[in-house]
Image (cartoon, rainbow, N blue to C red):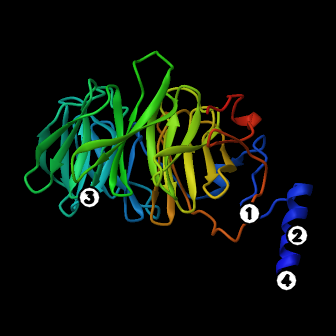
Amino acid sequence: MRLIVVFALCLSMAVLGISGPGAAQDPSTPTPIVKRAIATLTIPGYPDFLAADETAVWITNEGRVEKLRHDRPWPVASVPVPEPCGAMTVAFGALWVANCRDPSVYRVDLETTKVVSIIPTGLADPTGEMSLTAGAGSVWILTDRKGTLSRIDPGTNQVVVQICVAPYSYAAAFGFDAVWITNTGPDGERGQGSVQRINPATNKVIATIPVGPEPRFLAVGEGGVWTLNQGDGSVTRIDPGTNRAVASLPLGMVGGGGDIAAGGGRVWVRGKKVLLAAVDPVTNRVVEVFGPAAGSGGVRVAGDLVWVTAHDIHTVWVLRPEPQGPQCENEGVSIKNEGVTRKPVYPFLGQTSSRG
């Protein structure tokens, strides 16, 4: 009897549009981020890309990288780096950050907060719109736009393998025992992009997966691989079990910049026209939108906290996601075609059509 009552309640909520756990927020009324933030930090300079370090983060800034804590109003560490760029990673007791001035990777020791190695690598994107990652005992970075993924051995601080990948690949992430990279296609051409999966045991590309146009940043977690497609502002979800795109979310976050992260029971999408959108990975629906818009910036999940930067207004916000309760299955309506779930367009997020 209890199961029947619960099912009936869930069905009534879906029909009547009553919000329950995980129900989508009305996107025309974004939540002011300052009302949800547990901390709002003013950081002089150009705070942009992030890397998680337990519940703290490191940010790129002008001529330096800085460590922030949510309970401190100012950086707790600052390390000179000539021109830090792109999304960084923390691994092997160090912060790894690309430097755009002399295309290289700087290794910063977490205990001493000193640069202990500079590794000449080249960078696929000399403007810094890229990311490096760590996993399988290595650090990975895309080092040539013609299509080169370089593998760094943290034991020797040297590039030990260079892997041929698709050209115009800039961002890398690690998860599900693989390296994942986005392939945007030639600049200015909004054709379909792709994601490649690299097996670190063989250093070979084992899958190329079509996604939306101009995918740049990507995230791994919450049961999938997620790309932010700058060409049409959509987000594509890849099932790592099948190496297929299984959902396309038309968020309307078109244009350069932006960021995406997964954790805390959500996928977090940072854009220019929309400050931040939270996607429920169970339903593939936007469940909360934050505002107001504040130009581009980054987002990362660090422990139980979500960090958001806005470099144009020198601001960093810290959120603590609300605990996720039980959800009703089949909530909302989806239209399926050729294995890709297409979701309704959210007017506030833009009138971008989804892709199959």
The three-letter code of the residue at mark 4 reads: Arg
Sequence-wise first label, 2 or 1: 2
Residue located beneath label 2 in the image: 9
On residue 308, which mark appears?
A: none
Residue located beneath label 3 in the image: 91
Q: How far apart are the two marked residues, 4 and 2, measured between alpha carbons? A: 11 Å
Q: Where is residue 294 shown, x and y percent of the image? A: 58, 36
Seen at 42% across and 64% down, the residue is 55
Q: Where is residue 109 shown, x and y percent of the image? A: 18, 57
Secondary element type, mark 2: helix
Q: Residue furthest left?
A: 156
On residue 2, which mark appears?
A: 4
Q: Quadrant of residue 346?
A: top right
Secondary element type, mark 3: strand
Sequence-wise first label, 2 or 3: 2
Seen at 14% across and 42% down, the residue is 161
Q: How far apart are the two marked residues, 2 and 1, measured between alpha carbons? A: 12 Å
Sequence-wise first label, 3 or 1: 3
Sequence-wise first label, 3 or 4: 4
Q: Residues within 10 Å of mark 3 (few under 14, many from 20)?
A: some
270 over 145 or under it: above or below: below
The reply to whether discs 2 and 3 touch (Cβ–Cβ < 8 Å) is: no
How many numbered marks does the figure carry? Answer: 4
Secondary element type, mark 1: loop
On residue 329, which mark appears?
A: 1
The three-letter code of the residue at mark 1 reads: Glu
The reply, left or right, for residue 275 in relation to residue 344 is: left
